[in-house]
Structures are given as C-alpha cells and as structure tokens.
C-alpha cells in the first residue's frame, strides 16, 4: 500500500497560522522592553547611601561602554529641581567604564534621586534610577517614568520592525540563493518572484520604520517624536543610524539584482550564457547579502564585548547561513504548493545546501554561545542562557524534521527515476486512451475566450489533483511545512535573544564572572611628605596611609611627626584628592583627630583608579599654614 499523507486545506493552514501567531505573541511579549546589554555595576554614592555632606560629584560605573549626552544623568533634589551641572564627564580608565556629573554647591539635606538613560555599545537603550541621602533621608516628590528605556508602544513597534527585518532578509537572501543554487528554472516562476520581492519590500520598509523610531526608542519614548527632524539628524550621527542608512543603500543595489534575476536571467536560453550569468549573479548577490548582514554585525551584539574583530565576521556567516537555510526552505515550500512541476533534482540540491548551512550554523553558533554565555552556570542561571537552550532545542527539532524531508526527497527521486524507465508501449497505450470529446467553438469571440479560460482552469485543477494525489510529494510538503512552522518560531526566539542581556554580562553585573581575572592583592598607599608652615615649631613630616588604595571606600590615616621623631599636634589637618588628567576633584576628606599626632577618616571615596594628587593642609597656628602635594597611584 503506498504511503499517504494528509492534505492541507485552507482551514488547516489558517489554524496553523493562528497557532504560530499565538507563539510569536507570547515570545515577543516577553521581549518588551528589551533587556540591556550594558549594566550599571556601581555608583558613588551607592544606592540608598546616607552621606554626611553633599558630594561634589556623582559617578556611575557600567559593565561596558555606553553613549551618553549631557542630559543623560540627572540628579534631582527632593523637590524635583535639577541639582547637577548638566555636563557628563567620561571618567573611564583602563577596564573601568565610569561617568560622572558634578553637583551644584550648597545643596540642602534630604533624599536625592539619580536618574540615567543611555544607549549601550550594541545599540540597545538602557535606563535606571537610584537614591542617596544627604544628612538624613527625607520625602521626595520626584516621579520617574513608569516605562524603562525601549519600552512602551514605541518599544513594541521597534521590536516588531526588528523581527520583520530579519524575516525580510531571510526571504530575500534565501529565495535568491534557492533559485541560483538549486533551481535555475525557478527564476521564471511567479510564486518565487513574489516571495523574493516581498522579502525585499519587507526588509526595506522595516529598516525605514526602525530609522524613524530610533530617536524615540532610545530617548523620549513618544511616538510623535518619530518625525522630529532634529532627532533623526542625531540618529544619523550614531553607529546604528549609519548602519540603517547603509542597509537602505545596499537594498537599492539589491533591487537591481532582483530585477536582473527575474528579468534577463529568467529569459536566458543559451546554456553557456546562463552559466556565466549564474556565476556573476551569485558573486554579486553574495557580496550584497554579506554587506546587508554586516549592518547588523557592525552595530549590535557582535560589535561589542570580547573579540569583536572575530565576532563580527562570524556573525555575518551566521546570518547568511540562517537566511540560506530558512529562506531556501520557504522557497521550497512555496514551490511545492504553488508550482506544478518542481524537479526532484532541485529538492536534492537544496538538501545539500541546507546541510552545508546547518554545518556553518553549528560552528558559528558554538562560538557565539561561548562568547555571550561564558560559563555553564550562565547557561542555566541567566535569561540569555535559558533562551539559548530553547533555541538549541528548536534547531535540533528542525534538523530532525529536515532529516525526514530528506527521506521523502529520496523517495521522490526514486519515483521519478522509475517513471523515466517505464516502457514506451505504456506511453503509447496512454496515447490511445479515450479521446476528449470535441468542443464546438462559438462564433462569439467573448464566449470563446470565456470557454478557453474555463478549459484552462479545469486543466489546471486536473493537474493539481493528480499532483496532490502523489503520496511522495504530499509527504515532502507535510514535512517541509512542519520545518517552516518551526523556523518561524525559531526566528522569533532569535529576535528575542538579540534583545536580551548576554549571560556573561549578567554574571559580571552580579559579581560572579568566572572568566574574570582575580583582582590583584590590595596594597595600601603609604607616603611621607615633609612640610614647613613657616612659623615656630612648624617643620615636620606627614605620613599618609590610604587602605586599600582602590576605587571605592578607603580608610585614611595621617600621622604628623617633628624632625626629632616625636608626635606633632596641630589645630587643623585637611586632605583632598585630585585626578588632574580627568579633571576630577579636589575631593575633600576631613579626618578626625584620634590621638596626639594621629588623624583618621573612614569611607573616603575614590571614584576610579588612576594617578591621584594628595593635597595635605597643615595649620600650626592662626596664621601659619601650608599645603603640600604628592602624586600616588591608586587602583
């Protein structure tokens, strides 16, 4: 008994699309707002801290480089009034990414709110807020936005545009690759032409939408600001804006490629000319596809983090492999449903192309997983790692269904070979079968044309019934449709994954980065500075100790001694720290007298590592005072 497979009527296809839509809605709902790829890892003052006097500077430390404007960090008094100088300073040094904003002098006591918003190096908006108090906590009237950066209606629309951009890229590149690598005759088939053109239109429209929404997506969150020309101008000056514009320019060249593929190439009859044109289109189309893929790699995940020089070309290969596999799969599905006579050779050719694409996906995906996850604990203990496991499961399912499709392809090829070897007598017998009843053509031209259309429709329906009755073809259609359904969900998971904080970053933010080098042992700063206030008994030596001499809180000790080595008292001793290269400071420290010749202060905040100038002021009488300086390495 021949193998059979169920038919997929319109109702079944509609039900399948509804299920897929529900899955997509669930996945995309979990993706908004997008998690940040840069994270706030520290601040000075810390969240919830209570300080005795108002600091001169508020600093924020992040896990990676971010883009900030002068209005990106706001410090608000309890009344809601701005208390900062509206000028953000980049205080980064070495591997520490830190930014600060100076505060106005004479701030009153109370609870202050620090609100910040920025764009991480991989193009995703981030925001947050924390509070600290001067003197004692108080009530505050500051009301912060309820939605985070990248959320709300604008965030949802931007996320949809991201998904449709990936889908359009897959249809455009995969459909073109299917025609050039698997089925040259498909260039003349209208269903495949429509598929590739729709991919181009989808990618172009999505890119334009993302370009318009970029300013409100990373800024105000108001949809009306999408048409603000000043905001659009600012976007064009960013890395992401340049990538989107570059993508539009490449899509202009891709339109010419599509026109040639479905125009001159489809009409070419000479085998040698067809071969030459195939080579030229493959080379040119490959360059265009790689260029479009690079607009993602150069502006998103791969462009930041560890090994960006290797990660970006790997990301391009990954995107091309995804498009070749999933886009070719969609083209094959369209051909199986819409084209009467797709050859089994085309299906076998796609099977080989799909196998090569899966191999590239496995290699590049393994590297990307290591780069973004970084540890086994992050694979199961972070949102990124858990989504990655879901993606791996879907890819495994897709490969399993593809193996079934390959078996159906083999059966289809065997059937085609058997039909080709049938005796000629059977074909001749078929020719002597029942003759069709002659049809009288009416004299009316309109009626004749109507009858011709009816005959053509009946003939097409007869061919479709015969084709759909083929169990091998039905089995292949069923398995390919299942592949395409899983691929749609896989694409949604991948889109969410690109908007989720990498596991390596999340672990670093939580302070458990296994790949980070162990910090160097803390070595306190211990320096001696001679001084002379100019008055009687004004000469001596100051010993200053700062422990552990790293960024953050430190313990400060000052000892004064006379030239004979005995402890020296003084009415007043003050210390300040200045980082001249970063224009930070002076940051005052007011040590308390502990004993004769000994002053101490705890919790002295050093915002960042670097070469700091210690300024010591010693007053030995009402009129005798001196300030001495010493440069030391901290951190």
Image: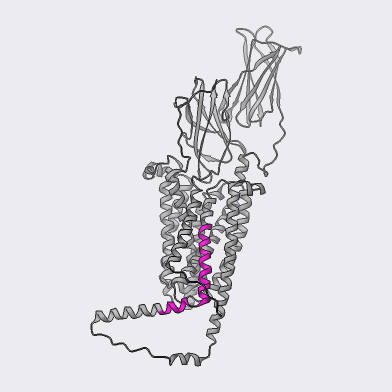
Quadrant for the N terminus in the image: bottom right
- In this figure, what is the number of numbered marks? 0
Q: Position of residue 241 (x, y in %)?
A: 45, 47
Q: Is 538 rendered above or below residue 412?
A: above
Q: Please name the residue shown 45% across and 65% down the image.
A: 13
- The verdict on residue 467 being magenta is yes
Tell me which corner region of the image, top left, top right, bottom left or bottom right, holds residue 559.
top right
Quarter of the image containing the C terminus? top right
Is residue 206 left or right of 444 when viewed as pictured? right
Residue 260 seen from this side: no
- Please indicate, yes or no, whether residue 574 appears anywhere in the rendered image: yes
| Identity of the residue drawn at 44% across and 61% down | 199
> Left or right of 445: which side holds 132?
right
Residue 128: give x, y in percent of width and height: 51, 36
* Magenta span of residues: 462-490
Q: Residue at x 69, y 37 (%)?
A: 519
Q: Name the residue nearer the viewer: 584 or 594.
A: 594
From this view, report whether residue 467 is shown above or below residue 121. below
> Looking at the picture, how far across and down is residue 438, in whole percent?
33, 89
Which percent across, then down, holds residue 588?
A: 59, 21
Rendered image coloring scheme: one colour
Residue in the image at 47% along x and 51% along y: 243
Magenta stretch encompasses residue 605: no
């Amino acid at each position: 008994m021949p193998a059979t497979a169920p038919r997929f009527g319109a109702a079944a296809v509609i039900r399948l699309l509804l299920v897929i839509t529900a899955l997509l809605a669930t996945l995309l709902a979990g993706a908004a707002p997008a998690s940040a790829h840069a994270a706030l890892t520290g601040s000075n003052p810390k969240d919830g801290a209570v300080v005795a006097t108002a600091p001169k500077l508020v600093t924020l430390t992040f896990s990676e480089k971010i883009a900030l404007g002068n209005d990106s960090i706001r410090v608000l008094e309890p009344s809601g009034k701005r208390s900062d100088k509206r000028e953000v300073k980049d205080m980064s040094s070495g591997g520490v990414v830190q930014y600060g904003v100076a505060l106005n002098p004479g701030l009153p006591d109370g609870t202050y709110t620090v609100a910040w918003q920025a764009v991480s190096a991989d193009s995703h908006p981030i925001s947050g807020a924390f509070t600290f108090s001067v003197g004692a906590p108080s009530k505050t009237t500051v009301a912060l936005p309820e939605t985070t950066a990248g959320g709300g209606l604008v965030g949802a629309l931007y996320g949809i545009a991201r998904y449709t951009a990936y889908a359009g890229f897959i249809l455009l590149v995969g459909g073109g690759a299917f025609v050039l690598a698997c089925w040259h005759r498909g260039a003349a088939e209208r269903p495949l032409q429509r598929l590739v053109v729709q991919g181009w239109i989808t990618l172009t429209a999505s890119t334009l939408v993302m370009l318009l929404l970029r300013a409100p997506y990373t800024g105000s969150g108001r949809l009306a600001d999408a048409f603000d020309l000043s905001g659009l101008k600012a976007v064009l000056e960013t890395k992401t804006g340049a990538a989107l514009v570059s993508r539009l320019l490449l899509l202009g060249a891709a339109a010419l490629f599509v026109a040639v593929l479905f125009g001159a190439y489809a009409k070419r009859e000479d085998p040698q000319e067809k071969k030459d044109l195939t080579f030229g289109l493959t080379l040119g189309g490959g360059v265009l596809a790689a260029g479009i893929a690079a607009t993602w790699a150069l502006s998103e995940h791969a462009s930041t983090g560890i090994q960006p020089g290797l990660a970006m070309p790997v990301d391009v290969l990954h995107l091309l492999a995804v498009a070749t596999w999933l886009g070719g799969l969609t083209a094959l599905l369209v051909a199986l449903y819409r084209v009467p006579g797709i050859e089994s050779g085309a299906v076998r050719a796609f099977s080989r192309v799909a196998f090569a694409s899966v191999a590239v996906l496995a290699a590049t995906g393994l590297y990307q997983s290591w780069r973004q996850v970084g540890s086994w604990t992050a694979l199961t203990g972070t949102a990124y790692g858990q989504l990655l496991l879901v993606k791996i499961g879907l890819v495994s399912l897709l490969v399993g269904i593809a193996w079934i499709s390959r078996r159906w392809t083999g059966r289809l090829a065997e059937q085609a070979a058997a039909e080709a070897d049938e005796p000629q007598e059977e074909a001749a017998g078929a020719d002597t079968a029942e003759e069709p009843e002659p049809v009288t053509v009416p004299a009316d031209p309109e009626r004749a044309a109507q009858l011709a259309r009816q005959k053509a429709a009946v003939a097409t329906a007869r061919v479709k019934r015969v084709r759909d009755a083929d169990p091998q073809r039905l089995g292949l259609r069923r398995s390919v449709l299942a592949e395409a359904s899983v691929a749609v969900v896989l694409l949604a998971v991948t889109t969410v994954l690109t908007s989720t904080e990498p596991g390596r970053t999340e672990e670093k933010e939580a302070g458990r980065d296994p790949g980070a080098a162990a910090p160097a042992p803390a070595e306190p700063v211990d320096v001696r500075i001679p001084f002379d206030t100019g008055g009687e008994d004004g000469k001596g030596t100051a010993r200053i100790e700062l422990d552990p001499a790293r960024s953050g809180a430190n313990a400060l000790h000052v000892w004064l001694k006379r030239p004979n080595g005995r402890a020296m008292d003084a009415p007043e001793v003050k210390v300040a720290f200045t980082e001249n290269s970063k224009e930070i400071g002076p940051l005052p420290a007011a040590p308390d007298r502990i004993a004769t010749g000994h002053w101490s202060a705890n919790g002295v905040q050093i915002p960042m590592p670097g070469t700091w100038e210690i300024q010591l002021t010693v007053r030995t009488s009402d009129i005798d005072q001196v300030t001495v300086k010493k440069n030391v390495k901290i951190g």
